[in-house]
Amino acid sequence: MKIALIDSGIGLLAAAAAIRRLRPDADLILSSDPDGMPWGPRTAADLRQRVLGAAQAAASHSPDALIIACNTATVHALPAVKAALEPAIPVIGTVPAVKTAVATGGPVAIWATPATTGSSYQTALIHLHAAGVQVTQIACPGLADAVQHADSFAIREAVADASRRTPAGVTDVVLGCTHYELAASQIRASLRRPSLVTPILRGSADAVAAQALRRLNGRPGAAAAGAGRLTVLLSGRQSRLPAAALAYPAGAYISAPAHA
């Protein structure tokens, strides 16, 4: 089994690690776009072209499925990628875990990039799934970029700023950018407040990994012998994981010698 993941940068690591945990035998193809990042500020047409480029680079390695491990790319390019690759290669997008979070009754906060916060897409998700639930949208300027570069000081500052603007008493915090899942421990620590329950963080990595395996009729725990291989593509060029990726447990896990 061979599964490809695409993103502008290292936000795909969390979903890649989730795939590795469920199917250690699966080969992983990680296709990111350092030449074109960040994708968020680009026009919709330009972003679609960058996403298609990353998808086609991954598709040249004949994966059995492809995950768009980026919320912004899913919003703007999922139909285009599906049109280009399906039915030969199933394509799975990433959706923020709003539905799961609001099932607790809230109140809920959504941390996302400034471009996504207040967007018609995120607003539609809230209207669709969160009727009657208090939802606060929290823009997190600089956080994705800080995570991308493993800048611990900038991560700490961005997380502290978003935490200060998150209402006390929220039960769940949706991580609306895949990069944020790499900083989950810092985010969780920042949200601990005396006499209040620490909110549950809701990422999308586990769900999207499980969905990809369902599309392939994959069964967690039914792994073949041996460890899957890792292929890294940086704007189409075969390479190694960027140094920043190895600063995170997910990056270290998928690049461990047993999985190389």
Image (cartoon, rainbow, N blue to C red):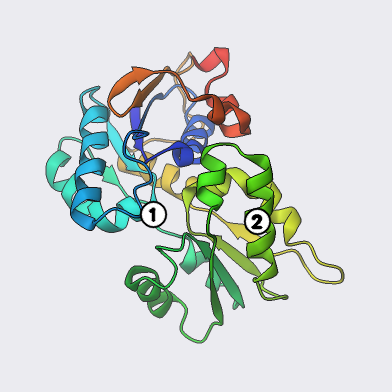
Q: Residues within 10 Å of mark 1 (few under 14, many from 20)?
A: many
Residue 1 visible in the displayed image:
no
- Camera-side residue of 85 and 149: 149
Q: x%, y% of residue 17? A: 52, 34
Which of the 4 image quadrants contains residue 159? bottom right
The residue pinned by badge 2 equals 159
Residue furthest right as drawn: 195
> What residue did someone put label 1 on?
71
Q: What element does badge 1 sit on? A: helix
Percent across and percent down for residue 242 are: 49, 25
Say above or below: 225 vs 49.
above
Q: Residue at x 26, y 43 (%)?
A: 51
* Gap between marks 1 and 2 measured at Cα: 19 Å
Residue at 47% from the left image edge and 54% from the top image edge: 177
For label 2, count other residues whose C-alpha is less than 10 Å away and answer few (under 14), some (14-19) or many (20+): many
Q: Amino acid at mark 1?
A: Asn
87 displayed left or right of 12: left
Task: Residue at 33%, 33% (x, y): give it.
Answer: 35
